Structure formats: structure tokens, C-alpha cells
Image (tube, rainbow, N blue to C red):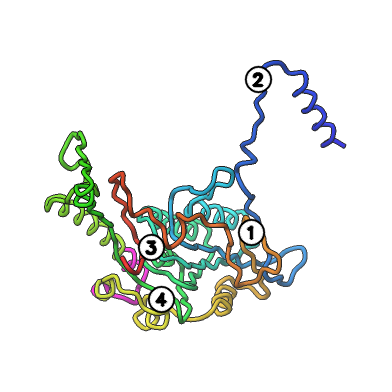
Amino acid sequence: MKTLTRSLFFVGLLVVAPGCIVIPIGDLLKGPVLQEQVLVQGAGFFSQEKIAIIDVEGVITGVESGGFLLPQADTVSETKARLNQVSQDPEVKAVVLRVSSPGGEVTACDVLHHEIARFKKKTGIPIISFISEQGASGGYYVALAGDTIFANPTSIVGSIGVVLQHFDLSELLAKIGVNVAPVKSAEGKDLNSPFRRMTAGEREVLQKLVNDLYERFVDVVDENRSELTREQVLALADGRVVSGVEAAEVHLVDRIGYVTDVLEEAKTRGNIESPTIVRYTRVPRSSANIYTETLVPKPAAREVHVSFPVDLTGAPKLLYLWRPGW
């Protein structure tokens, strides 16, 4: 009745209000609300002990993308929202961070790792990282934030390193009679421009930047993989990828296993007898189970075939990303 009364009141305002009418539609553009979905129901009616599965999927970005009416939140924001859900629920006793990612933008991967580590320190909730399909480059970087790392035997792990793609279109432009003559304050202002050849000095500047970020990656692996010396990390940090089985053999991960094994580990670390297993999603799906992923519709910019390395604005795009065929 109250809802009907409010609706009639609003309609009355539309009829009698003079001048322009402003209808707030912000809430309509926010997209689906993040909500908890139970995958496995544990014991307990009035109170439950939960294991929360948080998925990190696809290319990791720090920029919102997608359509006008349904924008896609970036990976960092989406994961942070799920961590917030956990921190507000005292019934969650352990988190499974399920990673299926080839990596992505350097800063996004670093911030995501930082937020997960910060959450773990603040809440004391154990986090078990599980590389389900691939945890390559930035995907592996994120998985390192967990207390322990599992990998599916057939998953792809590794690719420790940095890439900055450069395209030289100068000869092609010359053939079609196009000349690019930017007005700039200094020679390095259009660094990494695809419209001209890169000078030796410019390559040196960019190589220094790549090397610094590579060292950052090595530091994170070194800090989080106590089984490896720094020399062993450096020996593995040549961009190679390995299977989950080999990753366990060389101590990039702690154990190989399946999601059922990971949940048993979470159960033990969370000291849970009969856990309720949940996930957080904006697109609930009937008959969801422990193998169901987040299922947030991904725009093209978040798929493996992303085109963002080809940046014709000249802005360098530094990536912790494994992408075969480059």
C-alpha cells in the first residue's frame, strides 16, 4: 500500500510540477547487486561456518569497461567488493581465492595483491589460492597473496616477467603518404609512439622501466615463496610457463589438487566441521555448485584476445601478462 501511495505521489508531481523534470536514474545504471549464493549447505540453522570462494578471472584490469547501460567493474574493484562482503560476515572462516587468469595490467595486479594481503592481515582469515586453469604472470602474482597455493595438475603456472609491446607503423604510414609531426616539449614526450622508430636512448629508458617492474615481481615471489632462494626465483623468472605438476616440483606452488582438495584445506585451516560454501556474484545461476565460476559477463576488453596493447595514443601499457604468439 505504501509503495502504491509513493508511486501515485511521484506521478502527481510529474503532472503538476512546472518546467523541466529530472528523473534520477543513477541506480538503474549501477547493474546487478553483488549477492551471496550458497553452493553447498553445511550444518547449522541459526548460525553457519562458511568458506567463501572468490574468483579472479580473465585479464586483470584496473579500469571499468563495458556498455553504457551495464558497465563492467574492473577486476580490482570487483575483488575488493567481495573481500568487503567477507569482512562483514563473521560466519566466514576461510577464503578460497580461485585464480584463472593470464595476468594483466602491472598496477592492477600489484594493487590486487596488496588488497588481498591487507585483508588477510586485518581479518586473520586464512586464504588458500587455487590456480584452476591458469595463474600466469599477473595471475600468479595475485595468487602469491594466499597463505598457501594449490594448482590443478593441468593448469598453466609461471610466466614471471613484464612485457611492454611496441609497434612501429612508420614504414606503413610512409607508403600511404601519411606523416606524423607532433609538437612536443621534449624528445621523450611521445615515448613508445607507434608512428616513428624508437631511438636507442628511448629503448634504454623503457628497458629500465621494465627492469624495475620485473625486479618488483621477483621481490614478491621471493617474499612469498620461502621454499625458494632468490637465486632459484631468478632462475625461474625467465618468462617460462609450466604445468601445475611441475610448478609443485619447483616450488612455485605448494601442492597440486582439485577444488575439492582446496576446500578440505580451507576446512582445516578455518577449523570448520561442516562448512557452508558460498560465492559472491552479480549473476546468480540456478544449480550452481563448487565448479561454477562468478559468471560476470565479460566485455571484449577483459578477454584473452584483448587489443589494449595496441595503443595508438602512444601511452605505454606495461603488462604482467602471458599471451602466446606475441
Q: Quadrant of the C terminus?
A: bottom left
From mark 4 to mark 2, how far is it between C-alphas? 61 Å
Q: Amino acid at mark 2?
A: Cys
From mark 2 to mark 1, how far is it between C-alphas? 48 Å
Query: Is disc 2 placed on a helix, strand or loop?
Result: loop
From mark 1 to mark 3, how far is it between C-alphas? 30 Å
Q: Amino acid at mark 3?
A: Gly
Q: Kindly identify the residue that appears in the image at 41 percent across and 83 percent down.
A: 245
Q: Residues within 10 Å of mark 3 (few under 14, many from 20)?
A: many
Q: Amino acid at mark 4?
A: Val
Circle 4 or circle 1, nearest the eye: 4
Closer to the N terminus: mark 1 or mark 3? 1
Closer to the N terminus: mark 2 or mark 1? 2
Q: Nearer the viewer, residue 293 or 21?
A: 21
Query: Is disc 1 placed on a helix, strand or loop?
Result: loop
Pointer 4 residue:
253
Pointer 2 residue:
20
Magenta-colored stretch includes residue 47:
no
Q: List x then y, in percent, for residue 213.
A: 27, 57
Circle 1 or circle 3, nearest the eye: 3
User: Can you tell which quarter of the image residue 37 is in?
Assistant: bottom right
Pointer 3 residue:
138
* Range of residues picked out in magenta: 220-231
Q: List x then y, in percent, for residue 23.
A: 66, 29
Q: Residues within 10 Å of mark 1 (few under 14, many from 20)?
A: few
Q: Amino acid at mark 1?
A: Pro
Identify the mark at residue 90; answer none if there is no mark: 1
Closer to the N terminus: mark 4 or mark 2? 2
Query: Is disc 4 placed on a helix, strand or loop?
Result: loop
Closer to the N terminus: mark 4 or mark 1? 1
